Amino acid sequence: MNELHEKFADAGLVVVGVSDESEELLQEYIEKKGVRFGIIRAPGAMDAYGGRGYPSFFSIGPDGTILSTPAQRIPSDDFIENALRDVQLAPEMPAGHAFDALRTAWEKEDFERVSRELERGLQTAGEDAETLAGYTTLKQRFDAMCRSAEQRVERLGAGPDYFRSQAQLEAIADRFKGLPPAAAAKAMLDRFDDDAKIRKEIRAGRDLQRLLGRFDPSRIAQARKLREQLAKFRESCEGTYAAERATEIIASLATH
């Protein structure tokens, strides 16, 4: 895990350990393993995120969306690279009270207000070249972020995991409310609703998630039952992406 922490830090990602063990056991683990990454106690976190067994790995986007499931284990380099394409950190703001309202809106990810503050700043900067340059640069940064979000909508719309795509599109629609990315996300969600095949994929993905949440694969007996149920699920949802995922999970369980 220390190696994973260092690898992810180089990519600009944060590794956080979460434990629902007692403080005594947690401190013993930290000292024994020489842990160099942060660990917090959060009773119930495993259940909240659907973790089954230790360790479980979750990749969580800036908007709180879970990007990978525990069954995927440690994310691959390709997964990390793709995830980083969608990360947009708040830019460093120029000093001065002229940017206070914009700074607050951006930190809160109130992007509709960010758009208004940028337009207001550009209009009121007047002949103040430094302030005008600051707002111009930030407007370019914001426009690029919106374009990136719209491109992400297109990628999500291409599938194949329409169940997770739906959740991420809903997050984009909420995050960029009143702006073009939200309109694009809503249009894509409407397309999902109108497509019977995609609706089937979403139902299958939801059913798979529920199935995985019923078992603890760290226990031999439950892992065996989970494999049996996944095999049945695969047959009932043949031809779907969720069925392919079930096949991958069955294979991973067979190695444990």
Image (cartoon, rainbow, N blue to C red):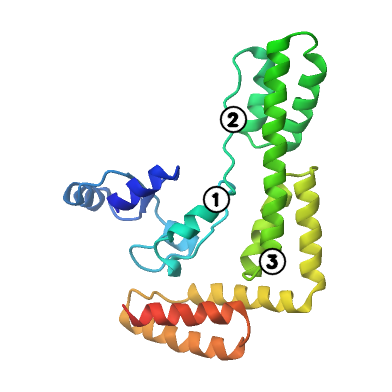
Residue carrying label 2: 91
* Coordinates of residue 74 in the picture (x, y in percent): 39, 61
Q: CA distance from mark 1 to mark 2?
A: 18 Å
* Coordinates of residue 149 in the picture (x, y in percent): 68, 48
Residue carrying label 1: 61
Sequence-wise first label, 3 or 2: 2
The quadrant of the rendering that contains the N terminus is: bottom left
Front tag of 3 and 1 = 3
Image side of residue 81 versus residue 27, left or right:
right
Neighbor class of circle 1 (other Cα within 10 Å; few <14, some 14-19, many 20+) is some
The quadrant of the rendering that contains the C terminus is: bottom left
| 154 up-or-down from 115: above or below | below
Q: Could you tell me which secondary element the residue under label 2 belongs to?
A: loop
Front tag of 1 and 2 = 2
Image side of residue 31 versus residue 199, left or right:
left
Q: Amino acid at mark 3?
A: Ala
Residue 170 appears in the figure: no
Sequence-wise first label, 1 or 2: 1
Residue carrying label 3: 158
Sequence-wise first label, 3 or 1: 1
Q: Amino acid at mark 2?
A: Pro
* Coordinates of residue 49 in the picture (x, y in percent): 49, 60
Neighbor class of circle 2 (other Cα within 10 Å; few <14, some 14-19, many 20+) is few
Q: CA distance from mark 3 to mark 1?
A: 19 Å
Q: Amino acid at mark 1?
A: Gly
Front one among 234 and 218: 234
Q: Residue furthest top?
A: 127
| 142 up-or-down from 226: above or below | above
